[in-house]
Structures are given as structure tokens and as C-alpha cells.
Amino acid sequence: MEESIAELRETFRSGTTKSVSWRKKQLRALLDLVNENEDSIFQALDQDLGKSRVESYRDEIGVIKKSAAYSLSCLDKWMAPKKGELPLLFFPAKAEVMPEPLGVVLIFSSWNFPITLALDPLIGAISAGNTVLLKPSELAPACMSFLTQTIPRYLDNKAIKVIGGGADVGERLLELKWDKIFFTGSPRVGRLVMTAAAKYLTPVTLELGGKCPAIVDNTLSNPSKAKVTAKRIVGGKWGPCTGQACIAIDYVLVEEKLASTLIEMVKKYIKRFYGDDLKELKSISRIVNKHQFQRLANLLKDPHVAASVVYGGSVDEEKLVIEPTILLDPPLDSEIMNEEIFGPLLPIITLKNIEESIEFINSKPNPLVIYAFTENETFKKRILSETSSGSVTFNDSMIQFLCDSLPFGGVGQSGFGRYHGKYSFDTFSHEKSVLHRAFYPELEPRYPPWTNFKFSFLKLAYAFDYFGLILLMSGFRKS
Amino acid sequence: MASEEEKKAVFDAESAKEVVKELRASFAAGKTKSYEWRSTQLNAMLKMMEENEPQILAALRDDLSKPELESSIFEVAMVKSSCRVALKKLKHWIRPEKAKTSLITFPSSAEIVSEPLGVVLVISAWNYPFLLSLDPVIGAIAAGNAVVLKPSEIAPATSSLLARLAADYLDHSCIKVVEGAVPETSALLEQKWDKILYTGNGRIARIVMAAAAKHLTPVVLELGGKSPVIVDSDINLQVATRRIIAGKWGCNNGQACISPDYIITTKSYAQKLVDSFKCELERFYGKNPFESKDLSRIVNSNHFARLSKLLDEDKVSSKIVHGGERDEANLRIAPTILLDVPQDSLIMTEEIFGPLLPITLVDKVEDSFDVINSSGTKPLAAYLFTNNKKLKEKFVATVSAGGLVVNDTTVHLTEHTLPFGGVGDSGMGAYHGKFSFDTFSHKKAVLYRGFACDAFVRYPPYSRGKLRLLEALFNGSFFGIIRALLGWFKS
């Protein structure tokens, strides 16, 4: 392990990764990797998570292709120094902010989107000119295996490495010095990563999770909008890896009087999209492993919680499948309402008035996303200004993930730092400010011994009082 | 009967918790979010600096013997300028930024909204106690946060002045100054903050970041390092020398994070450089620098002892070519230049933070880059004096540091359009100007969608046709989309 990292350092020092042509070559190679191995990727995702081809394309392959292509097309622009504007006082001078790579970076990815969450940050790290060690999650073993075997065949081995293994490997990696660590996972492990990073003053980006709520107001009274809302809620809950996604809808907030309408529509679309036979569910992933399955099954064991199930609830331990399940008003102090669910259980919480949803959300840690289905502009403004979350999406779910121009990241317990699009490039870069000055003209007042004149001069200069300076220098102003 | 000392409350973890609780309540009540509150506080801070300049200069004199001009310009004027910039630009900074959307999310609109992080902690340093306390606080206020400022106990007069002035001028329910040393800082660090900005050294920075990790609190660490100056030949030597002196002894007598730490020049040029220094130093500070009013003193006896140790090291003391005089009683060390000290000496491995300037020699000026890069750490600043275009280009391309300046020193600090921060061991994050606002904000992405145009392709049951359509959509190719749609209609 130490040898691999030493090699990454050496490669970085040699300057290979800094050239735009190297970066573009790697990004193209990554595109080739994905294009030429689609079937293997589909297979690995099916094996690890039971993802269907459309889901795999939509959430993994398509995302990476889009991300790499976008980076390729923007890279020259991103790498160009940004000109800074300087006040007249500095004349003649030139200022710019130059992005430069941080060095050797470590990326930890998660098991639920094992291709996307590994390769998307990798795209950012490469674009920014770093050397990289990628540690995919061992909880998605087929994908980890795919990555460890395929990446060396396409990408520059001396600069980009993949390491397999479990938590012990992760721990050892954290004992070493990195120039940046990018982590996607749970808050608990996020703390460990940041604590380890603190020893070396390594900057980190933590992409964590949280309970992402969906607020639904009286747009439900409009039948066609209600349909779209229900579809998007179903699509936003069970669509991504059967709810095992940091941006999946965790729970829904709706007014009491509209709850049954919502539940009926959600049931309808569950049946239409996935079927209603536990043994024959289609187009939906499964739970990743026994441990997660047990955790989710246990959430339902609480008798008060079990009593609130209004649809679904059946589990198939052998196939690691849990039916899309709707709960109506489980107790607010139950585990299901306090831990991130990360699975196919959807609590629906009813409120007397939908405006109470703001207070409800604020009583919990900041989520990664808040979804709100509403056309009420005042309510939208209130949600934006009175809640805090990584991001907010109105009248849809999940789709903000695909916007390259929007920063993707959390706040508070949902993490810090962001990526996607140019933000990926920035997160793996150091923005170095560069000021070019000339030898002439010289400002005598800069130097001691200090006099009243110099004092006045500098005071005026710092206030950018050019007129005052002229008066002072021409003798019309006393010092 | 309890004595005065016993009556004075101890600031412990409980007290820290209370402070945070109060600020959280103020923040939750929305006090700090309005534009009016922010601009009122910034105006109040401006007034505070204007009405108390004599007291501020006096406190800086007490703590650091800082020359009046340095205090007035680098502390007072810079804080005022920072307030003015924030006031002028605040409305613009607060406004959401529009973001582009693509075909995939059509129809939609998107923006990025800046929101305050909440309750933030600013821990400042002793060398520019006003500037390094208030500049970050300006950013925190501009971004709409409640803030606790912990000034350095090593500058006690300014610490207590800051506490008094903040209580008199600023909104006490949202902005507090907590004075103290290690116990008080530790008590503060146990609490949950929404952001911590720390200015200081690497050792404490590690403690700050580890404490922050427990609460997943993001941090900005403004540290230091050995900021090198490469001096080429064939330059205007007098101007270069003066600018180096201004950045070194003119900045709190070398006790500044971006002060030139050491010089690298060629063997053939060294003597000329030393002679130029001797000449200009005398011009600036007179024959006896101890009598000059234009030099700060060493802050305290600990640092005096530390600097003395650097000078007294075996292979180093014989390399002094100028200065070296010390006055322990008055905590003064004369501007000192050393020539060709060994690379493994303490003075060449630790950040000097004082009035000692070692000159390291190389054969060719291009070798300087190896010297800098071989140190294994990235400094906060790096400087180059040259007229050689290629050398400038190589410098910018190969030297990694927080910020670079060509043909001057330290002035980049005053330019608020440049991000000020370190990289690697010199820190993480940046501030000044809009960067301060950004560093204390959360940039929330907002996507607005409508109910029209619901893309059926998103939903199960999934099929080959949907897969093809999705592929086309992702590729953004109109023809692909039409082809897929046609194929869909056919099947």
C-alpha cells in the first residue's frame, strides 16, 4: 500500500497529471471503459443490488458518461486562470486566480451507487490534475471487483489506482497522508475520516445523508397534478436502489385531509411500476445484504410501527427483498422516524396544516435534499428561507442530481463540500492567487521612517481616496 | 467572603454551552438573516473602528509595541475597508445566482441560494489581533450568521478591548466575544458549531479540526509556513530590497504569516543583496534599530526565547552577516540577516515568525524551485523578484502555495478580489471580500420543476424502448431522441 502511494506521489511530482492532454486522455479512456463494458457493469449491478438495466443506465452508466463528456468539453475553460480586477492603486499589476491540483487524493465510495459514486468523483480528481487512489465499497463486491480489474486496463496505472478490501483497508489508508479525501457514506464514518484527516490537516469533502423529506400540499386536489406528484414520489423513493440512496425521499409530509388521496395514488403507482406480488416484483432493486435487510426489518418490528403499515410490509429474507411499504403516522419517537431509513419503507406523516412541515423538518438534522410539491409561491419562499438543506427541489424528486450546473453536497449533518460539473473540478483544486507587480512606479510612502505625510498618504490610499491623494501630493491638503 | 478572583466566573463547558444555546436561539429566531441586521452590524463595526482608533492603537502598542502607522493601516484601515466592501456589495452577494439547466431536466429553472450556516466560531491570532479577529467576523455577519469570537490571550490588551467594544457596539445577542486561553478555547471547541475559522499554527489547527470532526463541522484553517523569496539578478535591486524589508520587518517585525521567511538567491548575487539590505535597513530604521519607533517588538518572552534559540544554534550563529543584537528586557531583536545557513538547521526548518532573515544560496536561480519543493510543505505565500518572463512562468506553474506575488511581497493580502488562504500545511479554505461571505454561507442548490411534460421514460415498467430513449436523452442528441421515439412508436 505504501508503495502504491509513493508511486502516486512520484507521478504527481513528475508533473504528468498536470497537462491538459493527460487529463483529457484519461477522461476519454474512462468513457471507453464505460462504453465497452456496459454489459459487465449491468451484470455487476444486478449481482450486487438487483438493479435493472434501465435503473443502472439512468443512475450509473448514463451519469458517468454525461459527467465525463461534460468535463471533457469544459476542461480548457475550467483550467484557465480567472482574471482578478485590481484597483487603480496597484497599477500596473495583474492578478489572477489559478486552479492547481492538490496532489494525491483518496476517494472512498459507497455501495448503493457503486459505479457513480466511485467514478464521478474520480472524474473530478482527474480533471483537476491529481493522482488518485480509489477505494470502492466492499459491500458491492461485484462492482468493486469490476473496478479493480477494469480501471488498470484503461487508465494510467501510475496515476490512478484502485484498491479493494474491507474496512481494515480503509483504516490503514486513513493513517497515511493525503492531499484531499473525498468520502461518500454515513455520518458515523464521516467523523472517523475527518478525525484521521485532521492529523495531517488534509481537507475533506463529506457527502453524507439524512432524512430527506417530501412536502406535499394541496396540489393533490388537482387530479392531473396529483398523478404526477404521486409518480414522482414513488419514482423518488423506490426508483433509486429501492430507497437506498442519500437523496431518496425518506418520508412524506402531507395534510391530514389529503393523506388518503395520496396513499391511494402512491399505492396505484407502486402496483403499476413494480407489481404487487412480493415474489414477482419488477424494475426494482433489492436490499444490498443481510445486515441492511435485518436493520430494515427491525424498523418494522416495533409494534406501534407495524400497526401503522397501510401497504406492503412483507419481506423475503432469502431474496433480500422488502416490499414497497407505506406507513401512516408511525410514532414520531420510533427509530424509523429518527434514523435515515435507506430502504423501501415510506412513512407518511400527517399535519393539520402543511405549513407546519417547516417546523417539523427543522426539528431534525439538515437533510441532503428537501423535496416540496407545491405551486404556492409564498410557501416556496418560506421553505427556502426557513429551512436548511444541501439542496431543494420543487415538484420533482432525484432529478437535481443530473444538473451539472448545480452544486451537489450537504450542510450540517448531511456533510460539507460539493461536487458535480465544475464543482467537482473545484473541489479537487487549490485556487492559487497570483499577483504580478512591476518595479515601477514605486510608492515611497510605503517605507519607513514614517512621517505624517506618509501616514496621510497611506490612509488615503487604503480608503481608495484617489482625489484626496492628488490633493495631498499637490500640496493642497495638509498631512 | 469570596475574593474578586473567585467571584469572576470561570468559563467552562457549561458556560460555552449556554453561549451557543443563546446564539442558536437568536439565529433560529431569524435575527441575523435580514439584510437590515447585517448592514446595521457592519455599520456599527465601522463606527466602532472610527470612534476608537486611539484606544485601538494604544492596545496594539501595549501588546506588540506596534508602530502607529502599522496599527493604523494594517489593523484599523483594513478592517474599515473590509466593512465598506461588504456594505457596498452585500445586496449583490445575497442575491441568488441563476444556474443553467439542460435538456435532461427540461422544463426547469435553477438557482443557487446563499444561506447562513448558523452559529460560527472565529478563533484569531495575536499578531494582527484586530484584523484577524474582525475580518472573519465581517464575513460571518455579512453571510447572516451568529458568531463567537475568541481573540488570542497572547495579546491581552486588544483581547479585552475587543470584548468591551463588541459589547458596546454590536448586537450582543448574536455576536459575542469570549476571552480566555486554553481552557476556554477547549470549552468552546467541545460545542457544536456550524463552521470554525481558525487563524494560527499547525499544531493547534490539528486540535481544532479533530474537535470539529466530532460534530462534522467544516473548518477554515489559516496557518503559516516558510514563505520563500526568490531573488534573481538583473532586477532593480533597491526596489526589491525595500519591498522585502517592508514585507518582513515592516509587518509586525516579521511576525506575520505571509512575511518573507527566507531568501533564495544565487551565490554570485548574494553579496550585492546583503549590501543592499544593509543600506536600506539603515535608511529605514537608522543605525541603531533599537531606537527606531517603526519596528514592533517581539510579542513576549516565550517567542523571544524561541527566536534566540534559532540564532544560537551551532552552525547558525556564525552565519550572521547583519544585526543579531538582542535586548531581552525590552523584547527586541535587531533586523538580522544570515547567509548560507545549513538546510537542516532549526531556522531553516521551522517557521521563523520574527526579524531573522536567512539567505540560502543556489548555483542557478532555477534551482530555487527544487529548494522550495523539497521542503515537502506548501507555504502560505511565495515571492519572486525577476524580470525574466520564463522564470515567472515556471514559478507560477511549479510553486504551490496559498498565494504568489511576483516583484513584491505581502500586498496581495490587501486585495479583496483575491482569495486569501493556504494549501497543504499552510491551511484550507480562503477568505477576504466575497470569499469571506462565501466561506460562511451554504450555497443551496434549488431546482424548480413544473408538473407539465412528465417524461414517461423515467418510470417503470422498464423496457428496451425506454432504455434507448434514456440513452438518447443523456447524450443530448435530438436525432437520437427522435429515433428512439420512432422506434418506441413502432414497437
Image (cartoon, grey):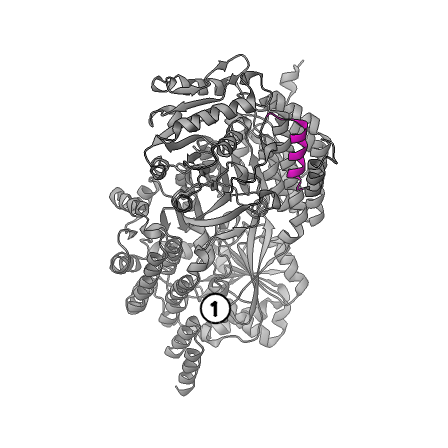
* Side of A139 where B400 appears, left or right: right
Number of numbered tags placed on the structure image:
1
The quadrant the C terminus of chain A occupies is: top right
Residue A457 covered by magenta stretch? yes
Image quadrant in which you'd find residue A202: top left
Q: Which element type, helix, strand or loop, lies under badge 1? A: helix
Where are the magenta residues, as a range?
A: A449-464
Q: Residue at x 69, y 40 (%)?
A: A470
- Note whether residue A354 is visible: no
Please tell me which residue lies in front, A344 or A128: A128
Q: Position of residue B156 (x, y in %)?
A: 60, 23
Chain letter for mark 1:
A
Q: Residue at x 67, y 30 (%)?
A: A453
The quadrant the N terminus of chain A occupies is: top left
Q: Position of residue B344 (x, y in %)?
A: 33, 26
Please tell me which residue lies in front, B401 or A160: B401
User: Is A75 drawn above or below residue B128 in the view shown?
Assistant: below
Image quadrant in which you'd find residue B321: top left
Q: Position of residue B442 (x, y in %)?
A: 56, 50
Which secondary structure dominates the residues rendered in magenta?
helix
Residue B217 covered by magenta stretch? no
**Amino acid type for the residue under numbered disc 1:** Gly
Pointer 1 local density, CA inside 10 Å: few below 14, some 14–19, many at least 20? many
- Note whether residue A455 is visible: yes
Q: Position of residue A190 (x, y in %)?
A: 43, 46
User: Is B169 drawn above or below residue B453 in the view shown?
Assistant: above
Residue at the spot of label 1: A235
Please tell me which residue lies in front, A156 or B283: B283
User: Is B349 drawn above or below residue B482 in the view shown?
Assistant: above
